[in-house]
Amino acid sequence: MTTKVENEEGEITAEIVTNDDAPTTAKEEEPAKDEEGLLLSYDVIICGTGLVQSILASALTRAGKTVLHCDPNDHYGELDTVWTFGYMQERQQQPPSHGPEEASSEEDDVLLLSPEGSYQTLKFHSTEIKTDFPVTTIGCKVQTPYGEGTVVGTQKSNEQNDGIRLEISMSKWTMADGTHPTLFMCVPNNHDEGQDETRQQQKDNNNKIVSLKSIAARRVLQQQSRSLALDVNPCLLYASGQAVQGLLTSNVAEHLEFQTMAAVYWLNHNNNNKLERVPCSKGDVFQSSLLPSPMDKRRFMKFFQSAMDYATERELQQQQLLLSTDSNNNNNDNQQENTEEGVLSLNERQLNQGRSLARPQNKAVSQKDLQTLYDCMEQNMDFETYLQTHAKLSPQLRQLIRHALALEVGGSTCSGNENQAVGLSTLEGMGRLCDHLKALGRYGTTAFLTLVYGSGEMSQFFCRSAAVYGATYLLRRVPKAVTWTSDNNNAVSGVTLAASDDAFMGAVPAKEKHVQATHVVIAQDAKLLTKSLPPRRELRRISIIHGSVVPDASRSVIIIPPGGILEQHNYAIHGIVLDESARVVPAGCNVLHLTTIVDQTKETVDDSTITAVLDQAVKVILESSGDDADEIYQTTFSYGLLDDDDDDGENHRKVSGLHVLKRPAMPLIVDEAFEQARGIFQEICGNEEEFLALSEQMQTKLKEQLQDAYRGPNQVEDDTEQVVLDSAMEMMKEQSADDVKEDEKKAHDVGT
Amino acid sequence: MHGRKRTEYKHRFADPQVAAGLAQKAQQWYALSDKALSLRENDDASMTLPLLDKMLRVNPDPLHLWNIRRSQLLLQSDSNWLSTELALTAAGLERNPKAYGAWFHRKWVLQRQSITTQVSTMESLLQQELALTDLFLQRDERNFHCWNFRRFLVGLELQLYGGTTDQDTTTLGDGSWWMTTTTTEQVIGPQITAASKTTTTIDSNNTTKIHSILQREWDFTQGKIVSNFSNFSAFHYRSKLLLLSSFGDGNGWSPKLASTSTQSVQAMAEQEWSLMENIMFTEPDDQTIWWYHRFLLDFVVTQQQQSAADWYVPWLARQAETLQVLVEEDDSERGCKWGLLGWHLVLSRLVASSEENKEERHQQMETVLDRLIEVDPDRTQRYQIMKKQKQQKPQP
């Protein structure tokens, strides 16, 4: 899909839109192209291949728009991609991106973009590889020159001054009486193995005692490092929501694999930092250790059932809204049906919801509670106050609901500082909670789905589907600036592409040029930073853990509330634990992704201060897991989060046709990306076209192109029933044929 | 058909191709049905059995086909048809997990097998079948056919070790029950075997086995309750298991408890109450737990003679207090109907067995019933009668 220029004269390149043999292009008037094979003018140019841009590209091409999608990097996804272990190490060695620089020319009609795209503020803080584990602890399993064994005793050696004599029980050898022989060996006291790597390796193979852990760790990071797929931004999907809907409408879901998240854990700092399961169903509620007293359970359930009712009512209202904005033709029947099926009807709307948290069929909706909720929303009460005064929940439960269920990020302890995130309002809080609740009980035990092979796959597959419907892709090509007409209209005129001297796979250098477009989509964080570093940074840590982080669930989410790790840290920490079943780590390992936000204070802070909170978080999580889990690799990096107000110039705000995407803070759930993409899609295409669905225009085009090969959606399924019946009929016929023969024979016998 | 919209399902028939296909199937089915009905005893079984096999795989519901099949099987000289019949019923149950005929046929086959087979072979066969019910109940935890089948299997298992308690568990395992008429006792319901109400003595080796089987079943219900406490089948099974228990004497079985080592009725009642309390507070509008509560109160009364009464009244008093809290927490228009009824029940039991605070409790019962009339006006007459009954002395 990557465009490769083959020569200067403008020969056809390997892109889809320039395929002259296709009947569509043959029939239509040949669009004008430049020497690279690009159209002179596009409907939309999208800069950067982040998830939102990728979804948007796919949606726009399906609606029949011509799209040019370019990215300065050599891979899809930007901050929403999956890094291989090798690529990540390469990336770390690159010099850190330059800080803010003064724009070279202050032109009124140009918006400069960063040559690195959204990567411009990416910075690595620390990286650690730990493949050496001491052998001098009792119970440690070791590899000796004579086979595997377990250390059962240590004592200071007399022979060597600083040596330690190990007593090793050789588990692979068994004596006649059933015991294991014991091996005594000396190791130097300061068991420092990292001095000389190559010599060390040789020694391992010869006559050294090495911990089995070290061997396993080296195997993972050396031989098996290709099975590591590390998400820059690991995301989850709600089992029912915008993302699932988008993936289904666009059929992109067919190319991806999904798995459920088995559990959501809450790091309970009131209970010795233990990981406790967040109740996600009635069964969880009645057993949950987070809800110790029966009264807690009652209030929790009561609150959730009214929240569910609110969710249902909200959904119905949204449907009504859609219907009323829809053309009012012959939809009367539908409308009638919907109004009747109000929240008061006692039918469970979806059978599968019955087992999550919804009220049973025989229970009436508490209109009073709903009314109180609406009143609180009217008053613009904040969520915390609502939970406290009306739902009468204990402080611990309030925190649980806000951070583990409404997935609130900002601090609960914010006081006095206006810059910090303030708690959600009741309306926002209930909205976020409802999104979560609606996805519960749909599939699996939690509301979340994860992608196999990493969530970064998604942006790539949306790009691919966009290419199938005719988008042109230009990777390794820097979109340098967005331009617009300087007359009164202030309409976007296009994008300037930087010159490319890239010699990738025989590509010939291309000159700097300007491509016209009616709409341009850019990411806010790809704008060339001119003023200062952003005020907040998203801090990420990827840890590879040997052993399992959470004992009884292979794939899980960990939520740490604000202040749960460090008193002064005002943001929640989101953790995602995945094992080999998600195909992102080799067997026997877990990957632990941690995400949080740090405030960028004015003075430059050293790396260790920034990373402290996540260092501590990993330590606490591994301690509470209790299992024999060790971190064998970790890397911590961060990138800037831009606020609305730190825009320079403001002048491009008034430009029509320029769409700026803002990366949300800590997007644990991708549904927000779909929402954002839909918003921009509607700005460009209006409400006529369905988001991510194939437009009629595209369908006819496809039919023409594929002609006979195109099949409708109705295909006959296998009918085993028919097969069995047919064979039974066959059998019966044979049988009756036999009977006839027999009768004839009898008749014959009688006759004779 | 669950979870499928009727309109969507019906919509398929609008397609002429689909409709034609279905019509053809119906024609074929009629032809095959006629053939099956005309089968006679002297027909060649090697032809008729495969034919019935195919028909029952397509539609496992018609009981007469299963009947024909059974009569054909009985005529067979060699009776080695266990595996084919198990496979057939399995296929049928896959198609319709609630086909009465298929379940009954499976029971019939196993029952016949148990007469002729050695204990050790039967043991492993039953283990397989139990594992199968496990899977079935994972698919649909409320399939009462499967629960009944499981009880039937356990009945067979107990029979292997001569395990009959005061009631014949084998017959009760198939879903039948004892009924006492004025003069005689008789078994009602679909029976696999002729009922016998005999008590035999069991040697101690078999006793431990029987106890471990019952304990395994108790733990099984625990697992099902934990995963979904709205599963009445599990509670029902639990009540049946409790009926097999005998607290107090050393030989009988009673559930082993996590909380305590003593297997007294008190300990069991305490543990069950704490489970019920948690469930009631999680979802007071789920009827399941209230039915089980009612059962347990009755059960404890029957066991009470053997145990000291000095815990019984305080146990009830604590329940009354807890339920009062539950009822008072609910301030919605519809109130907490089941909580009120449960509270009323506990209060009536208290009044019946203790003179303490009798007046106050009567007063409470009165208010509970008034509130019930308010929140559940449809059953006003019932509550009025309950009010009147309270005036009289409750039946011992």
Image (spheres, coloured by chain):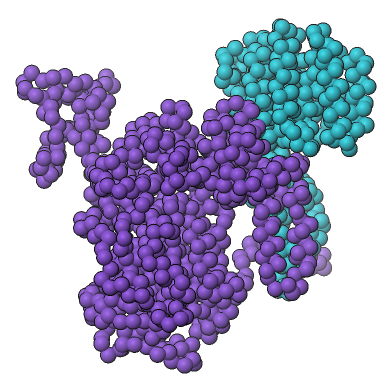
Looking at the image, how many numbered discs can be counted on the residues? 0
> Which chain: cyan?
B
Residue nearest the observer in this picture, A631 or A588: A631
Residue nearest the observer in this picture, A82 or B298: A82
Identify the image quadrant of the N terminus of chain A.
bottom left
> Which chain: purple?
A
Residue nearest the observer in this picture, B259 or A39: A39
* Residue A249, position as x, y percentages in the image: 56, 66
Residue A228 seen in render: yes
Identify the image quadrant of the C terminus of chain A.
bottom right
* Residue A633, position as x, y percentages in the image: 27, 44
A413 lies above or below B320: below
Q: Residue at x 77, y 58 (%)?
A: A339
A127 lies above or below A497: above
The quadrant holding residue B31 is bottom right
Q: Residue at x 39, y 73 (%)?
A: A69
The quadrant holding residue B5 is bottom right
* Residue B338, position as x, y percentages in the image: 77, 31
The quadrant holding residue A463 is bottom left
Q: Residue at x 45, y 56 (%)?
A: A664
Residue A475 seen in render: no
Q: Residue at x 86, y 33 (%)?
A: B374
Q: Is residue A556 left or right of residue B139?
A: left
* Residue B298, position as x, y percentages in the image: 78, 20
